[in-house]
Amino acid sequence: MLRTPKLDLFAGIPVASYAESRVWYEQLLGSPPSFLPHGTEAVWKLAPHRYLYIVEQPEHAGHARLTIFVEDLESLVAGIAERGLRSTTREHYPNGVEKISYRDLDGNEVGFGGSTKHRTRRNPQRKKRRV
């Protein structure tokens, strides 16, 4: 653990086309960016001191992978579906956690995880399926 009294997290995702990717991330996150540092970067505030940003860097696009844990996973996923995006995978873990992943236009993976406390699984193996 980092020993610091205050921490801000900026998770960056390099993309090939800023303009096209910005539209996709607005669909995924359900809002326009919180701020625009410059012409090819957009930042979304996810929670206090926690940010996700995209930046046009074609040479690095497609290699990001991040997971965001949320309290109400099903509602979040339903909202994303209403905005026209479909998940690429759903993973179930034996500890009651589920992860639902999306791939952007470049192949970067953004996953959302949360508890599935109301569901039970008999098989303790991690289950992954394409959707």
Image (cartoon, rainbow, N blue to C red):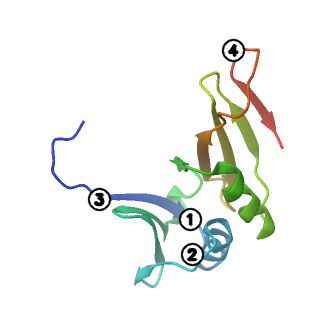
| Residue placed furthest toward the right | 131
Q: For marks 2 and 4, give the CA distance.
A: 41 Å
Q: Secondary structure at mark 4?
A: loop
Q: For marks 4 and 1, give the CA distance.
A: 37 Å
Residue drawn at 69 percent across, 52 percent down: 102
Q: For marks 3 and 2, give the CA distance.
A: 24 Å
Residue 104, above or below 64: below
Residue 124, above or below 7: above
- Viewer-nearest residue: 94 or 1: 94
Q: Secondary structure at mark 2?
A: helix
Q: Amino acid at mark 4?
A: Pro
Among the two numbered marks 3 and 2 on one chain, the one whose residue lies closer to the N terminus: 3
| Residue placed furthest toward the bottom | 39
Where does label 1 land, which residue?
Answer: 15
Disc 1 vs disc 3: which is toward the camera? 3
Disc 3 vs disc 4: which is toward the camera? 4
Q: Amino acid at mark 3?
A: Asp
10 Å crowding of disc 3: few (<14), some (14-19), many (20+): few
Residue 33 lies, in percent from the top left, at 51, 78
Where does label 2 land, which residue?
Answer: 18
Q: Secondary structure at mark 1?
A: strand
Q: For marks 2 and 1, give the CA distance.
A: 6 Å
Is mark 2 in CB contact (under 8 Å) with mark 1? yes
Where does label 4 land, which residue?
Answer: 124
Residue 35, above or below 123: below
